[in-house]
Image (spheres, grey):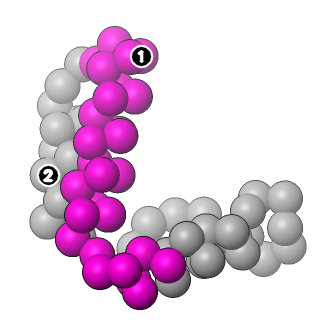
């Protein structure tokens, strides 16, 4: 996961994207990150994302 994130961080820092290209790159990043997780890890991730919505108290913003 860190390797994928680092690769995309480098890509985003060194490339210029159109809004549509940026959306597609973010979607590819999300798909690649989900592809390395097993089923139970994906379920835990989705559950954590539901619990950390911005309008809920204690929301978490950031990475890693």
**Side of 52 relative to 30 (left or right):** right
The image quadrant that residue 25 belongs to is: top left
The image quadrant that residue 14 belongs to is: top left
- Please report the bounds of the magenta region as a residue range: 17-43
Number of numbered discs: 2
Q: Is residue 57 visible?
A: yes
Residue in view at x 84 percent, y 59 percent: 55
Magenta-drawn stretch contains 35: yes
Residue in view at x 28 percent, y 75 percent: 37
Observer-nearest residue: 54 or 35?
Answer: 35
SS of the residue under disc 1: helix
The percent coordinates of residue 60 (x first, y second) are 64, 70
**Side of 3 relative to 26 (left or right):** left
Residue lying at the far front of the rendered structure? 39
Q: Alpha carbon of mark 1 to alpha carbon of mark 2: how far?
A: 19 Å
Are the residues tagged 1 and 2 within 8 Å (C-beta)?
Answer: no
Labelled disc at residue 30: none
- For mark 2, what is the residue? 7
The image quadrant that residue 48 belongs to is: bottom right
């Amino acid at each position: 996961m860190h390797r994928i994130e680092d690769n995309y961080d480098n890509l985003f820092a060194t490339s210029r994207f159109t809004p549509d290209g940026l959306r597609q790159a973010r979607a590819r990043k999300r798909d690649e990150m989900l592809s390395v997780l097993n089923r139970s890890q994906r379920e835990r991730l989705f559950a954590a994302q539901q619990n950390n919505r911005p309008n809920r108290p204690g929301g978490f913003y950031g990475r890693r």
